[in-house]
Amino acid sequence: MSLKNTVLVLFTALAFTAAVQCVASAETFEITKKVPVTAAKVLTLRLHGSQNADKSGGYDRIGVYDGSRLVQIFKIANVSPYGDKSTRTYDPRSGETTVVEDMNFDGFKDFRVQAEMPAGPNIPYYCFLWDAKANKFVHSKALDFVTSPEFDQKAKLVRSFNRDSAASYIDEAYKFENGKLILMESKVTEFAESPDPLQQDKLIKTETVKKRVDGKMKVVSQTSKLVNR
């Protein structure tokens, strides 16, 4: 066997050993989180998952309890659009990847769990809204597709930041209308090289703003200017 092949075999063996050790070190856990849906009704989430020695891991199912009674269960495999069997985040055992707040501004607390840990800032979540009429949580696919959401309780807007590429950023604002999530405003910020050879220390920054007018998204402004790198 050549030296090159020997090194390749050893590298493969080491990688396989590391993967086996990582899987073997994974520990299952269950943590709880309270959801005060109303002042008089407090439910408990039981988040079941596993975590590796490097603190990577995730939840594979979420049980909703009213006291000691199981009233709902959500399996990640059933809510993931990609068929993932669990979330993939850092330190899920801490509970910090689960957020409880009113996400549709109806006065009831909802919850969301971080779906994965991307390399960039676009953080996805699985979102669950409290349906007062049905007396249960409902998975919101519409909110799932809003990355890095922030919920402006005063303006009743869902704000999102999305990095489309290293030179393109998108800020969006959504509003709930009759229970549906509607895009109301977006601002796309793009950076491009200056064509002027004497201004190579500059970039062209272009901002395009769209707003919903008469039910359709329309460009309301577009500006460009030179900025320092």
Image (cartoon, rainbow, N blue to C red):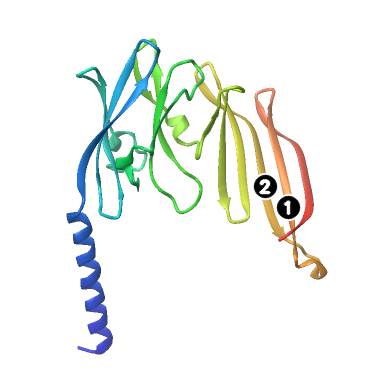
Tag 1 secondary structure: strand
| Position of residue 23 measured from the top left corner of the image (x, y, whole percent) | 20, 55
Marks 1 and 2, Cα distance to the nearest angstrom? 7 Å
> Residue reaching furthest bottom?
2
Indicate the amino acid at tag 1: Lys
Question: In percent of the image, x 62 and y 51: which residue is there?
Answer: 168
| Position of residue 186 measured from the top left corner of the image (x, y, whole percent) | 64, 36
Q: Which residue is mark 2?
A: 189
Indicate the amino acid at tag 2: Thr
Mark 1 is surrounded, within 10 Å at the Cα level, by few (under 14), some (14 to 19) or many (20 or more) other residues, namely some
Question: In percent of the image, x 30 and y 36: which residue is there?
Answer: 76
- Given residues 218 and 76, the one toward you in this image is 76
Position above or below: 38 against 92? above
> Residue reaching furthest left?
24
Regarding residue 83, the answer to whether it shows in the image is no
Mark 2 is surrounded, within 10 Å at the Cα level, by few (under 14), some (14 to 19) or many (20 or more) other residues, namely many
Position above or below: 220 against 222? above
| Position of residue 176 measured from the top left corner of the image (x, y, whole percent) | 54, 22
Tell me which corner region of the image, top left, top right, bottom left or bottom right, holds residue 10.
bottom left
Q: Which residue is mark 1?
A: 205
Regarding residue 177, the answer to whether it shows in the image is yes
Query: Along the horizontal axis of the image, is 183 left or right of 68?
Result: right
